[in-house]
Image (cartoon, rainbow, N blue to C red):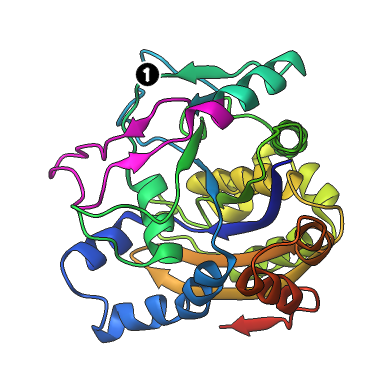
Amino acid sequence: MARIIAGVGSSHVPAIGAAIDNGKTEEPYWKRVFSGFEKSQAWMRDAKPDVAIVVYNDHASTFSVEMIPTFALGCATEFPPADEGWGPRPVPVVEGHPALASHIAQSVILDEFDLTICNKMEVDHGMTVPMNLLFGKVEKNSHWPCPVIPLAVNVVMYPPPTGHRCYMLGKAIRKAVESYPEDLRVVIFGTGGLSHQISGPRAGLINPKWDKSFLDNLSRAPQKLARIPHVDYMREAGAEGIEMVMWLVMRGALDDKVDEVYRFYTVPASNTAVGHIILENRRRGAKAAAKRKPAAGRHKRAAARAKPAVVRAR
């Protein structure tokens, strides 16, 4: 069966994408951001997922005030980069996994989550920036390392889904993935945030104390985060801090107890607090891989993940 081996949380600051695209990653301002993802890219190369599910929010690229789905699942064969006003990012077209995506849609809808099924959609920086941060720079005429299933969440127009709803959707996604018959290793991304506000009297707000507490509880007590109301996100993390509920979709798809293998936090990137975390399921790596007698290389990787060391970068 398919299984979710790990979850990744990452901010999706558009200026990070611009720094990659314009060759500025080694400049002093940006180097401290990108150096925080070097260990993550090494981890991803070792994990070698067969599929990634990326939870993100559309920034008026595919959807608008005329049509606002709360949850929209991409079931297409490919997802072109969107033109966000300065042309599409020079990254490859994102290749989908229609079979698994359609299976997730059926399972989750029958579990009473009302998804919008998208058989055609463009994806913006909310999705491609975290993919660059974890997979590295990928040339436009090349391919991303694995197929991707996009899950767009409305956190732009009120009312967004609650943290609890996102957390429970993650659990439904996990159930769907584990009922898929093909033997696939899946990594799920939660993106957005952390604390930031881009307009109004509080523009530039960043709350490191809130952000670090959120990361702590994401590892240890996600149910506590699932109870946080919208107004607390707005008050403590800024208007755009509500994006953090998308990390709870990722967390809900994991085991109750996980291993935190890496964390990174820095401020600011543009006007946003950049947060990142990698959480591995304890049982899914070594034990599940051993049952299906993997190739020697993959077996060694799974064994190495059985007792991961926590690494934190600040």
Is residue 21 found left or right of 211 in the rendered image? Answer: left
**Residue 261 percent across, percent down from the top left:** 69, 74
Q: Residue at x 29, y 59 (%)?
A: 17
Is 99 within the magenta? yes
Residue 277 drawn at (x, y percent): 62, 66
Residue at the far bottom in the pictured view: 28
Confirm whether residue 158 shows in the render: no
Mostly what secondary structure, the magenta segment? loop
Q: Is residue 90 left or right of residue 145?
A: left
Residue at 22% across / 39% down in the picture?
Answer: 84
Which residue range is magenta in the image?
Answer: 75-101
Q: Residue at x 13, y 43 (%)?
A: 87
Quadrant for residue 12, please give it: bottom left
Residue found 24% across the figure and 55% down from its top = 142
Label 1 SS: loop
Q: In which quarter of the image is residue 113?
A: top right
* Rendering coords of residue 114 (x, y %): 64, 15
Judging by the rendered image, the residue that carries numbered circle 1 is 65
Work out which quarter of the rendered image holds the C terminus and state it. bottom right
179 vs 136: above or below: above
Nearest to the observer: residue 77 or residue 230: 77
Please name whichever residue, 114 or 70, is drawn nearer the observer in this view of the structure: 114
Answer left or right for 38 relative to 245: left
In the rendered image, residue 210 lying in the magenta stretch gets the answer no
Q: What residue type is labelled 1?
A: Val
Please state the total of marks drawn on the protein image: 1
Residue 124 vertical placement versus 69 (above, below): below
Q: How many neighbours does mark 1 have within 10 angstroms: few (below 14), some (14-19), or many (20 or more)?
A: few
